[in-house]
Amino acid sequence: MEMDKINEYLQIAIDKVVFFLPKIVLAAVILWIGFKVVKKLVQLLNHALQKSGFSETLRPFIESTATVLLKGAVLFAIASVIGADLTGLFAILAAAGFAIGMALQGSLGNFASGILILSLKPYKIGDWIQLEDKFGSVVEIGIFSTDVLTPGNKILIIPNSMVTDSVVTNFSEKGKIRLELSVTMPYDESFPRVKKVIIDALLELPKVLKDPLPDVGIENFDSHNVKLLVRPYVMPSDYWEVTFESNMAIKAAFHANAIKVAYSEGVEMGSIGE
């Protein structure tokens, strides 16, 4: 009786081996060939991305994503050959993907924005940009954020979604930028004379560009002064240095040429305490 049971189990095992062995061999062949094909396709993709000038930051991410997806397709094909039921697995993956997506909404938004920035290239490393009130030089462009070095030597880590949702000013795109400085002059002063004094003072500064020449115009009028807009051109990296130097040079030139500035009289001074 026991021998009959053993023979029965042995026959079942032999039938299972006979049934699954060809599928296992086929699955092994598909796995070996499939991974070889995936490697070749990723190499071709890498070559295409390099020729198209894709960002060095984005390229490894695209390659790794493509590798995972293609290898996943190979494994799913093997599971189908073996005869595994993938319905439950697909349901689990869909539920997990939904849960992860809900938990990482903000991060996914930054991720999508990072892909756009690295693809469209509104700025590159080394460019001077301004985003709202944040100004500095781009030192790193990542998938989730952009790192900006301010003139005060601080690193700003700006979420990429903020970049794509706001107006970004790229000061380096044209190679030079124009400062916009506000200066006042009294009503009884000659504007052509003041304009010449300002331009001559600015041209003495080595980092103010001579082509195009600085521009000086009347912006508007207030109760005490004529407001002037002074616009010299500089290189982006000299933005703050030339701003301070220009204001100092204009003040010194006004003093040397006896140009006065009107101001309200009768200001009462008071103590501020300890």
Image (spheres, rainbow, N blue to C red):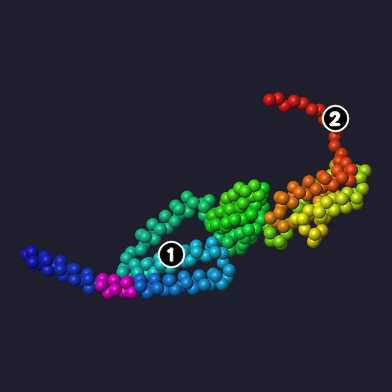
Residue segment shown in magenta: 20-29
Tell me the residue at 54%/61% (across/down).
57
Badge count: 2
Residue 189 can be seen in this image: yes
Tell me the residue at 78%/46% (across/down).
248
Q: Amino acid at mark 1?
A: Val
Question: Mark 2 sits on what residue?
Answer: 266
Residue 135 spot, x, y in % from top left: 66, 51
Q: Which labelled disc corresponds to residue 68?
A: 1
Tell me the residue at 56%/66% (across/down).
54
Q: Residue 25: say if magenta.
A: yes
Q: Quadrant of the C terminus?
A: top right
Q: Quadrant of the N terminus?
A: bottom left
Note whether 61 is above or below 274 in the view shown: below
Tell me the residue at 91%/51% (across/down).
192
Residue 185 spot, x, y in % from top left: 87, 44
19, 179: nearer the viewer: 179
